[in-house]
Amino acid sequence: MTTSPSTPPPGFSRRILRDEVYDYIVDVLLEGGLEPGSSLNIDSLARQLDVSPTPVREALVQLEHTGLVRRVALKGYKVAPPLSEEQMKELFDAREVVEVAAVQRAAGHLEELLPALEDAHEKHRQAAELFQGIEPAGRTAGYRKYFEADWNFHETILRNCGNRYLHQMAESTSTHTHRMRQSASEGSDDTALALAEHEAVLKAFQRGDVPAAAQAMAVHISNARTRALNNDQP
């Protein structure tokens, strides 16, 4: 039996619910509504959001992979503390190794990569402008959308590098989620610097100079690490 394109496949609605629950918990984390060590009760969250426990459980499993929450034996899920300085250094180091390798391997995929990367950069620029227009008191809610656009630039390269495992490895580090959490809690803002560094990567690709693009990506991630650790402001 063939499923009609207009009919959602089995599990489609549940995936939407899982993503909505995931976004809700991330937003609450960014707003400081959940302190490190706080319990995340599946049944309580399900009642609060008027959903079944299944999408809540799936969202928490997904959040556990990012390191934002932890599963404690016999105690369920708890909010994880922010990463230590040493953990953040290691995470950025891993990200640099993987992403520079992805840029280098994108040389044979520039035809597919360039239009997608140009579009991702434009969307990042628009997200940055929207974020800058938000009053400081309301910025917490805007961090997730901005960081999603920022990460999409990186993910576009990873999706078009010809190696699916590099993409999976980069996703598993989830540096952007920790940076987002840290930035929201500290009120930091490096949008202008991140945009300029992304543009350097894009322009090198547009020239067909992949080594320069790899160098620009290494510089960007190194600078992002410095800003994350030193809380520099643009």
Image (spheres, grey):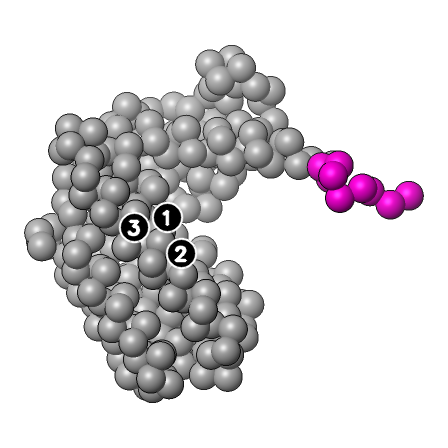
Nearer the camera: disc 3 or disc 1: 3
**At 87% across and 45% down in the image, what residue appears?**
2
Q: Is residue 34 left or right of residue 44?
A: left
Can you give x and y, in whole percent of width and height, for residue 33 in the image? 28, 23
Q: Does the magenta stretch include residue 83?
A: no
| Residue topped by disc 1 | 148
Q: Find numbered disc 3 in the image and state the secondary structure of the residue it sits on.
A: helix
Image height of 185 relative to 149, above or below: above
Q: Find numbered disc 2 in the image and state the secondary structure of the residue it sits on.
A: helix
Type of residue at label 2? Asn
| Sequence-wise first label, 3 or 2 | 3
**At 61% across and 27% down in the image, what residue appears?**
54
| Sequence-wise first label, 3 or 1 | 3
Q: How far apart are marks 3 and 2 (CA)?
A: 13 Å
| Residue topped by disc 2 | 152
The answer to whether residue 224 shows anywhere in this view is no
